[in-house]
Image (spheres, rainbow, N blue to C red):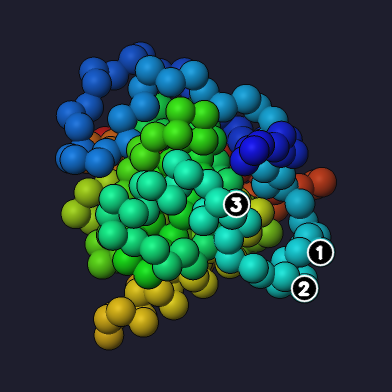
Amino acid sequence: MDRFRPLRRIQVEPEPAQPPAAPAAAAGAGGDAERDEPPAPAAGLLMGAKVRRRAAVYCDCKGDYIGVPNDPCLAKILSKQGDNKVLFADKVLKFTQSGKMKRRILVITDFALYLVDPDADILKRRIALAAVDKLYISNLSDNFFAIIVPTEYDCLMASTRKKEIVNVIVKAIKSTSEYEPEVASSNRFEYHAAAEVIKVVEFEDADGGIKTRITNKEKS
């Protein structure tokens, strides 16, 4: 089963080359340790479309776009964690500490978020919904969203179903607690790619699309 078909081209303005930094300490058990993996190919999600896509207009949301119950690897991962209620599942791109794009399967249950490597069938990270404090999106029609997890480190991803993912996360958290995470819309936001690494994401409406720039925040 091909769970990760080729996607449309992604265009992200790279940051200036910088000297290699010393490896950061692991962010804790279940951290997304993937420095030795090859980066995802440049062919990815279209992030520059000014016009809303047909799927976004009609909101044809079905939640599980992967077929988790029929996937032995994903079903086993959830079973080990005691999770069985899948609210959402689809392919996404995740941005690493070094700025590389990694192909991932994002599974959202009523208790946690799971990021699975589709090539190695390995769980790379589990984020408890209770640990999610805020979500960032831009004011433009790009596909980026950031999940802010103060007790660990944050996660920047991209998906053509960004709006559905954000809505599912917010509703899931509200259904299990009295807390509702903030969804902040801004064309410039920061996130912790690692404990000591802060990235700045900026969006600009340009001719023919949206220019996206991801850089390291300068230390004061």
Q: Quadrant of the N terminus?
A: top right
Disc number lying in front (3 or 1): 3
- Residue highlighted by disc 3: 66
Q: Is residue 180 visible?
A: no
Asked whether disc 1 touches disc 2, contact meaning CB atoms under 8 Å apart, the reply is yes
Q: CA distance from mark 3 to mark 1?
A: 20 Å
Name the residue that disc number 2 marks: 58
Residue type marked 3 = Ile
Q: Is residue 171 left or right of residue 8?
A: left
The single residue placed furthest to the top in the displayed view is: 19
Between 69 and 63, which is closer to the camera in this rendering?
A: 69
Distance CA(mark 1)–CA(mark 2): 6 Å
Label 2 – label 3 distance at C-alpha: 20 Å
Query: In front here: 135 or 205?
Result: 135
Locate residue 45, reporting x and y percent.
67, 42
Task: Check the image and report above or below for 77 versus 10.
Answer: below
* Marks 2, 3: nearer the viewer: 3
In the rendered image, the vertical position of residue 137 relative to residue 47, given as above or below:
below
The image shows residue 155 at horizontal and vertical percentages of: 39, 47
Say which quarter of the image contains residue 83: bottom left
Q: Quadrant of residue 147?
A: bottom left
* Residue 54, numbered circle: 1
- Mark positioned earlier in the residue sequence (2 or 3): 2
SS at badge 2: helix
- Which three-letter amino acid code belongs to the residue tagged 1? Arg
Identify the residue at horizontal 49%, vertical 67% (top origin): 87
For residue 57, say whether it is visible: yes
**Numbered-mark total:** 3
- How would you rate the neighbour count of disc 1 (Cα within 10 Å): few for under 14, some for 14-19, many for 20 or more? few
Q: Residue at x 23, y 56 (%)?
A: 150
Q: Earlier in the sequence, mark 3 or mark 1?
A: 1
